[in-house]
Image (cartoon, helix red, strand yellow):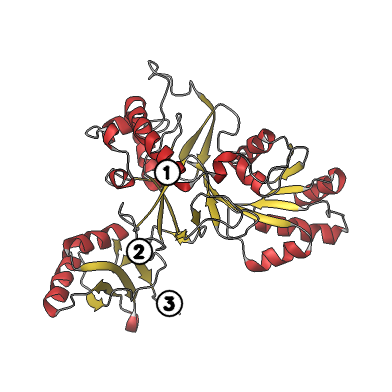
């Protein structure tokens, strides 16, 4: 039995990169031709010239939070889907399902097996043909339940569509049917195990789990391991599908095939240095929903080297936090994009972080800037930019390069209210 889902997972990294960059101009050209949104957003872009990461980084970013307003202006998907050629009036022609996420944001699903590309994450977690999988992700409104079901069926698993809630019935089904695999959130798996203990039901058939949808804490991992359940994580969004997944190496998450990942400074489209925490931006090779430079709003960092498991794609740390660090100071919103604008005004600044405190109960902003050219004139100039761009006064602290923490934070709110 192979340890890998397919040969793509063990390609030479240079071969993978060459393949992605060769396909990128085609996907951009396709998106321009068949998506109303990208037809306008990339109108002046020569698709054939976008064949490097540097060229890709010059294209505009599409942020997840922008989808709400785009969809309000143009239903059902803000002009982002690519309908079949010659059928612009048939937005559902090539779609299989439509889902709703909070906002609301409507998410399309195309037709075909494993459309969300989750099969390789299940395979890496040890799921195999013939396994019975207990699926506790919701089948209502959101896509998670179908994401995992279609992937499980693609590798030959049988699926029990448990959905969410009804814990006693969940325990009863596990005790009766003896599934070996679980998918869902870690917190719900813990609830199921605790309910089984309370009912004195045998759920020991569960031996492997693929978890997603929320943070997975070390205490939970230890609890499940004590029960003989091997747990793996998958990182995904309702827009992109699978982005990265854990393997038996348990050493970061391996990026899914068929994606281009960028890590950028929050509030910008500018790539960060290798290993630095930043916002996840994904370009997907999807003919139904061809998202180009899609900013998920999540933060992570790239890990050096390849996974000890033998998969050669890029590794990331996994989900670290949210990039949208917007906060309100003295009644006015301050955004990461404003901090980025200040940095661009002053070439001497390498990196900046706006820290908000409230000594004596009064809001105070301090912009900490990494620079090798600290001086009083620079501090004054930055202070003026801070006031002009944010419409608020604040202090400026110039620090040496490398002084600020590598955690992706552009705005840090340290106010105390007790």
Point out the tag, 3 or 2, that comes first from the N-terminus: 2
Q: In this view, does 316 lie to the left or right of 310?
A: left
Q: Residue at x 40, y 17 (%)?
A: 87
Q: Does residue 295 appear in this view?
A: yes
Instruction: Please tell me which residue lies in front, 320 or 176.
Output: 320
Name the outermost residue toward the top: 86
Q: Disc 3 and disc 2: Cα gap in Å?
A: 15 Å
Q: Disc 2 and disc 1: Cα gap in Å?
A: 38 Å
Residue 417: give its label: 3
Point out the tag, 3 or 1, that comes first from the N-terminus: 1
Mark 1 neighbour density, 10 Å: few (under 14) some (14–19) many (20 or more)? some
Residue 312 in the image: state x and y as whole percent. Answer: 53, 50
Residue 276 in the image: state x and y as whole percent. Answer: 39, 63
The residue at which mark 2 appears reads as: 327
Q: Is residue 331 above or below residue 125?
A: below
Which structural element holds mark 3? Answer: loop
Mark 3 neighbour density, 10 Å: few (under 14) some (14–19) many (20 or more)? few
Q: Does residue 143 appear in this view?
A: no
**Quarter in which the N terminus is drawn:** top right
Q: Which is in the foreground here, disc 2 or disc 1?
A: 1
Labels 3 and 1 touching (C-beta < 8 A): no
Which structural element holds mark 1? Answer: helix
Residue 238 in the image: state x and y as whole percent. Answer: 51, 42
Which structural element holds mark 2? Answer: strand
The residue at which mark 1 appears reads as: 17
Q: Which is in the foreground here, disc 3 or disc 2?
A: 2
Residue 142 appears in which quarter of the rendering?
A: top right
Point out the tag, 2 or 1, that comes first from the N-terminus: 1
């Amino acid at each position: 039995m192979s340890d890998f889902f397919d040969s793509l997972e063990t390609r030479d990294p240079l071969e993978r990169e060459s393949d992605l960059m060769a396909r990128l101009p085609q996907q951009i050209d396709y998106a321009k031709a068949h998506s109303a949104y990208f037809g306008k957003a990339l109108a002046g872009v020569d698709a054939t010239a976008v064949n490097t990461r540097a060229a890709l980084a010059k294209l505009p970013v599409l942020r997840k939070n922008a989808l709400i307003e785009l969809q309000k202006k143009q239903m059902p998907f803000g002009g982002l889907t690519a309908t079949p050629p010659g059928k612009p009036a048939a937005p559902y022609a090539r779609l299989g399902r439509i889902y709703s996420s909070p906002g609301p944001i409507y998410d399309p699903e195309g037709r075909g097996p494993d459309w969300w590309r989750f099969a390789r994450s299940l395979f890496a977690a040890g799921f195999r043909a013939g396994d019975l999988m207990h699926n506790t992700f919701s089948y209502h409104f959101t896509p998670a339940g179908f994401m995992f079901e279609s992937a499980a069926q693609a590798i030959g698993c049988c699926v029990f569509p448990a959905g969410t809630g009804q814990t006693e019935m969940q325990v009863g089904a596990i005790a009766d049917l003896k599934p070996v695999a679980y998918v869902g959130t870690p917190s719900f798996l813990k609830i199921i195990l605790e309910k089984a203990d309370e009912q004195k039901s045998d759920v020991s058939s569960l031996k492997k789990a693929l978890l997603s949808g929320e943070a997975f804490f070390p205490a939970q991992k230890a609890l499940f391991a004590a029960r003989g359940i091997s747990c793996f994580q998958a990182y995904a969004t309702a827009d992109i599908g699978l982005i990265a997944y854990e393997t038996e190496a348990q050493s970061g998450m391996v990026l899914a095939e068929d994606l281009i990942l960028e890590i950028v400074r929050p509030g910008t489209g500018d790539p960060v240095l290798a290993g630095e925490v930043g916002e996840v931006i994904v370009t997907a090779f999807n003919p139904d929903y061809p998202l180009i430079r899609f900013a998920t709003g999540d933060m992570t960092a790239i890990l050096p080297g390849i996974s000890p498991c033998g998969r050669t794609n890029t590794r990331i740390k996994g989900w670290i936090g949210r990039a949208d660090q917007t906060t309100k100071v003295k009644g006015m919103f301050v955004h990461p994009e404003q901090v980025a604008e200040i940095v661009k005004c002053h070439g001497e600044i390498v990196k900046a972080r706006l820290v908000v405190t409230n000594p004596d109960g009064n809001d105070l902003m301090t912009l900490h800037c990494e620079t090798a050219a600290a001086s009083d004139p620079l501090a004054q100039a930055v202070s003026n930019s801070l006031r002009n761009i944010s419409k608020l006064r604040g202090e400026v602290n110039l620090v040496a390069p490398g002084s600020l923490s590598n955690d992706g934070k552009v705005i840090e709110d340290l106010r105390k209210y007790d």
